Image (cartoon, grey):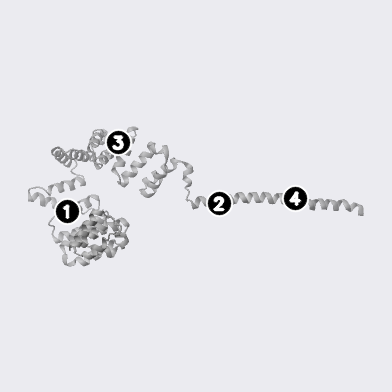
């Protein structure tokens, strides 16, 4: 029986000797696999750390589509980000230019660029009917009356008879210095579109300047009636009334309440109404100012700038310096002159001189700073 068992032992030895070799082959494969996985994970981590936008792999069309969706949703921040990521030849394509034009229409930020973009679309034959109105309006805003006239004369028939085209016709005539023709065109427009609230407000505004007191009184009454709807035309009527001289105390208080409650009113509307209240109630100045600052001091940076600008107009320079950190207003081209001028008006000459020390880097011209120093030294 013994000789028969030897082959089994030899087989076992062979199998036991072969096993490590097989395990070594599997281990090498596993190492390679894990190395590949590690490289992939490292690559992904680097993409995340470097903030790589995977959308770049999809090309410009992805960003144009993303920008279009953002513009339609009025998400201007996302739209701008998408627009900025479109590169190269794709920026000359009609779909991209139309996206940029629609973004600029929505934000109303840059009439010069809007006019340029629409002109590019026009040369490609891609200008839509309503875009002629926008191009004319943008050209006027950019100060190019000649280009506005050319576009006005090319507005398609479908759009030529509308109220917007009539408004542009009046505006172009005024920009060309043809005042008499502009007045005639405006009167025709007011009569033709008399039932539109925008025209009704404009007509009442024009009649406030009538030489006849009874016409002025009727126009003023209508404007107060127009303030009832909380829409853009109601706000327009409020703004016209806010510019009226000699408003009574009761009218100022009514105006302030209406502006405070209007959903479309801007901070500037609020501040202008508050200035009227300050004039109507000078004995309550401190409490009125405190309430206005408390309402707006925690707003956006833009809102804070509007607040400080209004305080400067009200000559409340001490409030500006208390409310805003020194490093903020002392480096601001808008706020620094207001504070310096305020110190001069309050005759705080030493404080003004300290503010204008020659070793400081100032956000105003050397000439302007020297003028204030001379004024402070003289006093």
- Count neighbours of disc 2 (C-alpha within 10 A) and say few if under 14, some if 14 to 19, many if 20 or more: few
Name the residue tied to disc 1. Answer: 243
Question: Does residue 96 sit above or below 34 in this rendering?
Answer: above
Residue drawn 75% across the image and 50% down it: 21
Q: Position of residue 213 (x, y in %)?
A: 7, 51
Which structural element holds mark 4?
helix
The earlier-in-sequence mark between 4 and 2 is 4
Mark 1–mark 2 CB contact (< 8 Å): no
The earlier-in-sequence mark between 1 and 4 is 4
The earlier-in-sequence mark between 3 and 1 is 3
CA distance for labels 1 and 2: 64 Å
Dividing the picture into quadrants, the one containing residue 353 is: bottom left
Q: Position of residue 352 (x, y in %)?
A: 23, 62
The earlier-in-sequence mark between 3 and 2 is 2
CA distance for labels 3 and 1: 36 Å
Quadrant position of the C terminus in the picture:
bottom left
Between label 3 and label 1, give the one nearer the viewer.
1
Mark 3–mark 2 CB contact (< 8 Å): no
CA distance for labels 1 and 4: 95 Å
Q: Position of residue 322 (x, y in %)?
A: 28, 65
Q: Which mark is residue 60?
A: none
Which structural element holds mark 3?
helix
The earlier-in-sequence mark between 4 and 3 is 4
CA distance for labels 3 and 2: 53 Å
Name the residue tied to disc 3. Answer: 129
Name the residue tied to disc 2. Answer: 42
Residue 158 visible, this orientation: yes
């Amino acid at each position: 029986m013994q000789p028969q068992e030897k082959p089994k032992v030899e087989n076992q030895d062979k199998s036991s000797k072969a096993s490590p070799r097989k395990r070594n082959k599997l281990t090498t494969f596993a190492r390679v696999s894990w190395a590949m996985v590690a490289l992939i994970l490292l690559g992904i981590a680097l993409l995340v750390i470097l903030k790589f936008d995977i959308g770049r792999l999809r090309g410009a069309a992805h960003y144009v589509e993303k920008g279009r969706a953002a513009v339609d949703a009025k998400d201007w921040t996302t739209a701008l980000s998408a627009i900025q990521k479109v590169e190269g030849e794709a920026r000359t394509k009609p779909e991209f230019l139309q996206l940029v034009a629609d973004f600029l229409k929505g934000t109303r930020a840059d009439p010069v660029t809007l006019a340029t973009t629409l002109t590019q679309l026009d040369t490609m034959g891609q200008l839509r009917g309503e875009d002629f109105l926008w191009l004319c309006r943008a050209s006027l805003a950019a100060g190019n009356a000649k280009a506005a006239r050319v576009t006005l004369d090319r507005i398609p028939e479908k759009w030529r008879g509308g109220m917007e085209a009539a408004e542009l016709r009046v505006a172009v005539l005024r920009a060309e210095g043809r005042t008499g023709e502009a007045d005639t065109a405006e009167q025709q427009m007011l009569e033709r579109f008399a039932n539109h609230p925008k025209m009704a407000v404009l007509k009442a505004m024009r009649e406030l300047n009538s030489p006849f007191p009874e016409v002025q009184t009727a126009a003023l009454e209508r404007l107060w009636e127009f303030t009832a709807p909380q829409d853009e035309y109601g706000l327009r009527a409020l703004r016209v009334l806010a510019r009226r001289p000699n408003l009574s105390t009761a009218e100022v208080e009514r105006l302030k309440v209406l502006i405070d409650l209007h959903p479309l009113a801007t901070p500037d509307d609020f501040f202008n109404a508050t200035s009227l209240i300050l004039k109507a109630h000078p004995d309550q100045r401190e409490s009125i100012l405190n309430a206005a600052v408390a309402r707006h001091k925690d707003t956006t940076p833009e809102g804070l700038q509007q607040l400080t600008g209004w305080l400067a107009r009200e000559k409340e320079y001490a409030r500006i310096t208390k409310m805003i950190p020194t490093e903020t207003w002392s480096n601001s081209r808008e706020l620094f002159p207001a504070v310096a001028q305020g110190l001069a008006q309050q005759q705080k000459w030493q404080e003004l001189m300290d503010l204008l020390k020659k070793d400081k880097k100032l956000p105003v011209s050397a000439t302007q700073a020297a003028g204030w120093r001379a004024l402070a030294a003289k006093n």
